[in-house]
Image (cartoon, helix red, strand yellow):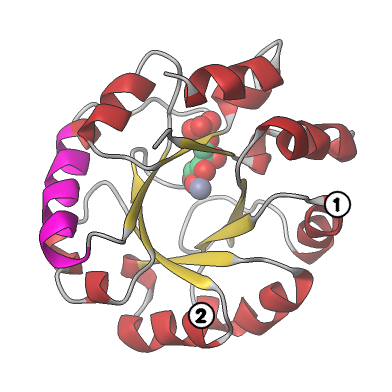
């Protein structure tokens, strides 16, 4: 199966959002929405009006990556806007199993995101319930950061673990993904590549998406 590309709208042109939404509609696989609260991560991104503007126009599945405390407060609203998948951070959820169930009960796919400093082995139990793991390859909070090289080995470790525990669970890699490192990330076992800067920072975003997919 060829790899899926999920452009991160954090790097889109917010003065001309429709144009960048249409690029993803035409060439991308998934809209990746980074929601930041300035508490869990040292940055605030965007909220409801922008999410609605994207879901209204989106012709591809939309996923929300919640880098916020108490993410469960927003599941119902996001579902009503048309978000199809939600990932929550392992580090923010005291009752992760319940939180994942809440997402699934609303008919959405549930992902568990982990920071670079969080071991994949902590996912041993929740991996049975999750539709995907979002492995952060930068410390969350900002687009355009450098890929942490050790992430590749971590993806391979996660892949092995997933094959034993729940082979249907996808691996999504997020942070610093570009044309130079996409091949090693794919070979290590990633199913979905998130790319912000590598897509919207490129002079030809459509081609960048295509090249990432064909890597
Ligand atoms: C970081 C976000 C990422 C990020 C990806 O906290 O979760 O989705 O915006 O952007 P690039 O590809 O520029 O690292
Ligand atoms: Zn993200």
- Ligand 2 neighbours mark 2 (CB distance < 8 Å): no
Lower sequence index among marks 2 and 1: 1
Expressed as whole percent of the image width and height from the top left, the position of residue 39 reads: 51, 64
Expressed as whole percent of the image width and height from the top left, the position of residue 163 reads: 15, 55
- Identity of the residue drawn at 35% across and 46% down: 136
Name which quarter of the figure residue 185 lies in.
top left
Q: Between marks 2 and 1, how big is the CA–CA gap?
A: 23 Å
Residue 156 vertical placement versus 211 (above, below): below
Name which quarter of the figure residue 74 lies in.
bottom right
Expressed as whole percent of the image width and height from the top left, the position of residue 16 reads: 89, 33
Verify CB contact (< 8 Å) between mark 2 and mark 1.
Answer: no
Viewer-closest of 174 and 62 = 62
Mark 2 = which residue? 103
Q: Is residue 83 visible?
A: yes
Find out whether residue 197 is within the magenta segment: no
- Identity of the residue drawn at 33% across and 80% down: 96
- Identity of the residue drawn at 43% across and 47% down: 140
For the residue labelled by badge 1, is the local secondary structure a helix, a strand or a loop? helix
For the residue labelled by badge 2, is the local secondary structure a helix, a strand or a loop? helix
Viewer-closest of 182 and 33 = 182
Crowding at dot 1, Cα within 10 Å, few <14 / some 14-19 / many 20+, comes out as few
Left or right side of 21 for 170:
left
Q: How would you classify the magenta stretch by its main secondary structure?
A: helix
Name which quarter of the figure residue 201 lies in.
top right
Expressed as whole percent of the image width and height from the top left, the position of residue 83 reads: 67, 66
- Identity of the residue drawn at 61% across and 46% down: 30
Viewer-closest of 186 and 90 = 186
Crowding at dot 2, Cα within 10 Å, few <14 / some 14-19 / many 20+, comes out as many
Span colored in magenta: 153-166
Mark 1 = which residue? 57
């Amino acid at each position: 199966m060829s790899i899926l590309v999920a452009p991160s709208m954090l790097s889109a042109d917010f003065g001309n959002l429709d144009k960048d939404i249409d690029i993803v509609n035409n060439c991308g696989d998934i809209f990746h929405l980074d929601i930041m609260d300035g508490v869990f991560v040292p940055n605030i991104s965007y909220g409801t009006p922008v999410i609605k503007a994207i879901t209204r126009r989106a012709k591809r599945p939309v996923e929300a990556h919640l880098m916020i405390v108490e993410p469960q407060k927003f599941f119902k609203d996001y579902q009503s806007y048309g978000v199809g998948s939600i990932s929550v951070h392992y580090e923010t959820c005291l009752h992760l199993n319940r939180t994942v169930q809440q997402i699934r009960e609303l008919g959405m796919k549930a992902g568990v995101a982990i920071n670079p400093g969080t071991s994949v082995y902590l996912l041993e139990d929740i991996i049975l319930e999750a539709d995907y793991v979002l492995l952060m390859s930068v410390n969350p909070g900002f687009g355009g950061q450098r890929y942490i090289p050790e992430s590749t080995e971590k993806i391979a470790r996660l892949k092995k673990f997933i094959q034993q525990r729940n082979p249907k669970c996808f691996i999504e890699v997020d942070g610093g993904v570009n044309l130079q490192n996409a091949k090693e990330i794919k070979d290590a076992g990633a199913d979905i590549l998130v790319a912000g800067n590598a897509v919207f920072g490129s002079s030809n975003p459509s081609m960048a998406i295509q090249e990432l997919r064909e890597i």
